[in-house]
Image: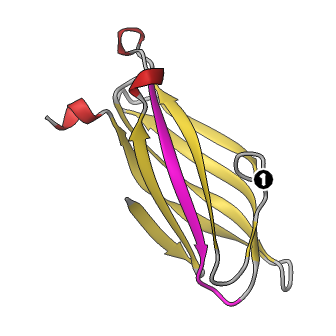
Amino acid sequence: MATTITEGVKVSVETIYQPEYSNPANDHFMFAYRVNIENLGNYAVRLMSRHWYIFDSNGAKREVEGEGVVGLQPVIEPGSSHEYISGCNLKTDMGSMKGEYQMQRLLDNATFKVQIPEFYLIAPYRYN
């Protein structure tokens, strides 16, 4: 599990290879990832948007931006967390992702960026 803390917001990511949705013969590898966002600070925050950097082991790079996460812009109260599961397809059996969330502190509407730690997408058979 990869974890980072930025301005009192802790982001942890865990990955799961999805063999039932993958087709290695056609260079299609599907991964799920579970993200837990925990507010360690003293003020409520809202996750406004995300920006992902996605890398295949063949050198391909992609960027994905959008509002919220899985259709939500959750408010995370102090001491609380928000968890979601999403997915990513690669053309190789190994790659990585990293990124950032744009957050808004509800007390004063100030915005700030929270780093999403780099995590690896690796088909389990590559570990052998």
Q: Amino acid at mark 1?
A: Leu
Which residue in the protein does label 1 denote? 72
Q: Going by the picture, which residue comes out furthest to the left?
A: 128
Q: Foreground: 31 or 93?
A: 31
Residue 33 forms part of the magenta stretch: yes
Q: Secondary structure at mark 1?
A: loop
Q: Going by the picture, which residue comes out furthest to the top?
A: 25
Q: Residue at 60% x, 39% y: name it.
A: 63
Answer left or right for 94 relative to 106.
left
Q: Position of residue 26 (x, y in %)?
A: 42, 9
Residue range (magenta): 29-42
Residue 96 forms part of the magenta stretch: no
Q: Foreground: 13 or 81?
A: 81
Q: Compared to 43, does 112 lie above or below?
A: above
- Indicate the quadrant containing the C terminus: top left, top right, bottom left or bottom right: top left
> Which corner quadrant of the image does residue 118 belong to?
bottom left
Q: Residue at 47% x, 57% y: name it.
A: 13
